[in-house]
Image (cartoon, rainbow, N blue to C red):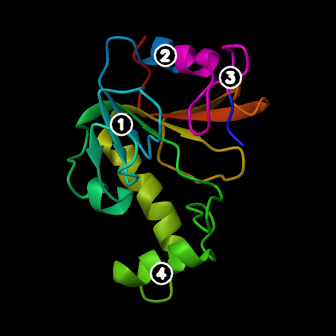
Amino acid sequence: MARLDSGMWIEQFRHSDYMKEHLKNMTVGHTVLNLCSGKSDFGIVRIDIDKSLKEPTSYADMFHALKSFRNNQFDFVYVDPPFERNGINFYNPRSKYIVEKAKELGYKDEFGRLVYDWQKQCFDIAKICLITKRDRSNVNLPALYTEYHKLWDSRPSTVDIRFDWKYHPR
């Protein structure tokens, strides 16, 4: 159950204040696209499929939204899709959601290819860096280098935030 815990932890599908501030500090002065944004207010463009939320700036299925952006359109792309929520798992090529989405998008038997492709598309949209929560998955993107930051999450627990850099802005 989602709850507010003395102002430190924010309700479900939001990040802790600490995590949000860390991401804002990493991206200060840059444009940010936040895909699968949920209740997060991080980023100038925030996209989620859940129309009951007021925080997104646009509502769309992530796979269809990815097609509407050009390469290097945003300095940073932050994507936090569900690892597992209501049967939706973006990182598991055998999950029912990915198998169905892959068939819909014309993938034959290479459902695992979709798991790589959506992350590669996000990386291509980013001019500087793709930021993901990837404590359970590792995809080899053509990044200059990759770094992890361990941050407090909203459960309370820690989470690894992965930065795949095309180049470092500093």
How far apart in space, not on screen, are marks 2 and 4 (Cα)? 35 Å
How far apart in space, not on screen, are marks 3 and 4 (Cα)? 34 Å
The numbered mark at residue 9 is 3
Residue 102 in the figure: left or right of residue 45: right
- Look at label 2 and name its amino acid: Met
- The quarter in which the C terminus is drawn is top left
Residue under numbered circle 4: 100
Q: Earlier in the sequence, mark 3 or mark 1?
A: 3
The answer to whether marks 1 and 4 mark residues whose Cβ atoms lie closer than 8 Å is no
Q: Which residues are magenta?
A: 4-22
Query: How many neighbours does mark 3 have within 10 angstroms: few (below 14), some (14-19), or many (20 or more)?
Result: many
Q: Earlier in the sequence, mark 1 or mark 4?
A: 1
Q: Please, is residue 160 above or below residue 88 in the view?
A: above
Residue under numbered circle 2: 26
The numbered mark at residue 54 is 1
Secondary structure found at label 3: loop
- Look at label 1 and name its amino acid: Lys
